[in-house]
Image: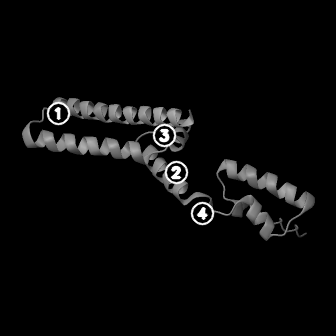
Amino acid sequence: MKKLLTLLALGLTMTFGVAHAADAGADCAAKAAEKKLAGAAKASFEKKCVADAAGAAATTSPVCEKSAADKKLAGAAKASHIKKCMADEKAGPAAAPSCETVAADKKLAGAAKTSFMKKCQADEKAGAKPEAAAKPAAAAPAAKK
């Protein structure tokens, strides 16, 4: 039963991928018609357009797209954000040490570890790296009279 459901899901996924490619071809043909291209120029444009559409669909992740949409980015800013987001995803958690790793390196325990972990995780959600959470804020120098 599981194999049947897996095969069914795989088949549907492949069908949608083919449909998407066909849509990209139709979209590219429409764009070529708008530009009034003909002959080799039209064929070259459509080939590049379909390749770009397939490449863009394969290289973006829904997480990065959602992040860009949440930040209301468009144009070059959106492209740059997605490119950086994809690079960060590929690098994965090995790119920056996790809060647990930093806490273990600092040999924190008890309340100190709990406090550090809360701040570190909040900073991670805000976009800061765990190393930034590991550095304590510099104490203000005492005022001289």
Q: Position of residue 84 (x, y in %)?
A: 49, 54
Mark 1 Cα-neighbour bin, 10 Å: few <14, some 14–19, many ≥20: few
Q: Secondary structure at mark 4?
A: helix
Which residue shows up at 25% across the image and 41% down it?
Answer: 49
Q: Give the CA distance from mark 1 to mark 4.
A: 45 Å
Is residue 93 or residue 141 the one in the foreground? 93
Which residue does the numbered mark 2 point to in the structure image? Answer: 85
Left-right relation of 141 to 28: right
First of labels 3, 2 by sequence position: 3
Residue 33 picture quarter: top left
- Sequence-first disc among 1 and 4: 1
Question: What type is the residue that disc 4 sits on?
Answer: Ala
Mark 4 Cα-neighbour bin, 10 Å: few <14, some 14–19, many ≥20: few
Q: CA distance from mark 3 to mark 2?
A: 13 Å
Residue 134 falls in image quadrant: bottom right
Mark number for residue 73? Answer: 3
Could you tell me how far apart the alpha carbons at marks 4 and 2 are, in whole angstroms?
Answer: 13 Å
User: At which x and y percent is residue 54?
Assistant: 33, 43
